[in-house]
Amino acid sequence: MSLRVLVVDDSAIMRRMVMRKLKRTGLGEFEFVEAGNGRDALEEFVRQAFDLILVDWNMPAMTGIEFVRRLREQGGTTPPVAMITTEKTVAARRQAEKDAGVQAYVTKPFTVEEIKASLAPLIERLVA
């Protein structure tokens, strides 16, 4: 089973890195769709279904936090969301998890092992 993953980051290099490292985790097969900011990500979300969303915090047009809040405001079932960001403070993590409903939090730079540890619980629930 292949999981459809929306990868949202304003850096194309970072999107490729996230995708490459997620593939290397061995957690499954993935089909990726990319978006350069939260606004574009919302448009992709409306057009097609995703199993998992990986989103950066700091982006132009619409930040990752704004994107997640808008996603949740739409109601209905939404896929799990993981924040992949340079924001390392406890307050930022709390805001993402408690205020926006992010289910996993990965700080940049990250290793394959770190992304695997953070995303494994989400992915295991998706494929169970």
Image (tube, helix red, strand yellow):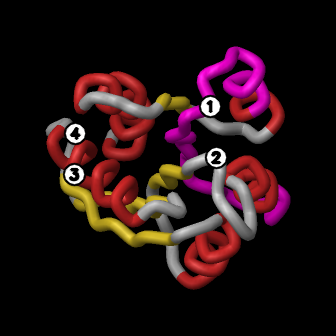
Q: Is residue 13 above or below residue 128?
A: below
Residue closest to the eye, 63 or 43: 63
Q: Mark 4 points at which residue?
A: 27
Q: Is residue 111 above or below residue 18?
A: above
Q: How far apart are marks 4 and 2 (CA)?
A: 24 Å
Q: Which residue is drawn at 71% across and 34% down?
A: 96
Say whether disc 2 or disc 1 marks the residue closer to the N-terminus. 2
Q: Distance between the residues labelled 2 and 1?
A: 8 Å
Q: Residue at x 74, y 48 (%)?
A: 65
Q: Distance between the residues labelled 4 and 1?
A: 25 Å
Where disc 1 sits, the SS reads loop
> CB of mark 4 within 8 Å of CB of mark 2?
no
Question: Which numbered disc covers residue 20?
Answer: 3
Disc 2 marks a residue whose amino acid type is: Trp
Disc 3 marks a residue whose amino acid type is: Arg
Where disc 3 sits, the SS reads helix
Q: Name the residue under label 1.
A: 87
Question: Which numbered disc covers residue 57?
Answer: 2
